[in-house]
Amino acid sequence: MRAIASPVVTAETKPFWNAARRGTFMIPVCTACGKAHWYPRAICPFCAAGTVQWREASGRGTIYTFSIMRRVKEPYAIAHVTLDEGPTMLTNIVDCDFDRLRIGQAVAVVFKESENGQPVPMFKPV
Ligand SMILES: [Zn+2]
């Protein structure tokens, strides 16, 4: 497994990273319109309400698109995964045969340790 760069943790994303340390995948959900979004913002991008809360997500999604980086020492797959809750996030697909990846494939979150020990959410086929 290639080294994963440690994420930049800000005041806004600290609850997300703290939850990741417990193996919990959180996404921001607006309590005014009920929609989830990604990346995290204090103001809802759909209705501009400032009532965004962190909620535990299913950790399930599908591959919207992906690209395999092969011309490096340890090949890896980057992908946009559309979460079951709606938002699409840029992530990595891991623990699989890259040649068998398909758009629309179902994936589930898995946490991988980054260089400083902070777990980072990635996805693997289910
Ligand atoms: Zn909203």
Image (cartoon, rainbow, N blue to C red):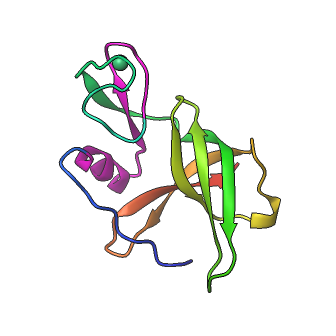
| Residue under the point 34% across and 71% down | 117
74 horizontally vs 42: left or right: right
Left or right of 117, for residue 83: right
Q: Residue at x 24, y 49 (%)?
A: 14
Query: Toward which corner of the image does residue 70 lie, by quadrant?
Result: bottom right
Furthest residue toward left: 11
Rendered view: 57 above or below 99: above
Residue under the image location 42 percent in, 32 percent down: 37
Between 109 and 99, the one nearer to me in the picture = 99
| Residue 115 sits above or below residue 22 on the image | below
Provide the residue span drawn in magenta: 13-37
Q: Which quarter of the frame holds ligand 1?
A: top left
Total of numbered circles in the picture?
0
Determine whether 92 is above or below 34 in the image.
Answer: below
- Assess whether residue 121 is covered by the magenta stretch: no
Percent position of residue 115, x then y: 37, 76
Question: In which quadrant will I find the N terminus?
Answer: bottom right
Vertical placement of residue 49 versus 27, above or below: above
Q: Residue furthest bottom?
A: 73
Measured as percent of width and height from the top left, residue 6 is found at: 35, 69
Residue at 43% x, 44% y is 25
Quadrant of the rendered image containing residue 77: bottom right
Residue 9 located left or right of residue 1: left
- Residue occupying the far top of the picture: 32
| Position of residue 27 measured from the top left corner of the image (x, y, whole percent) | 40, 37
Q: Foreground: 51 or 1?
A: 51
x and y, in percent, of residue 107 in the image: 65, 47
Q: Nearer the viewer, residue 54 or 11?
A: 11
Check if residue 28 falls in the magenta segment.
yes
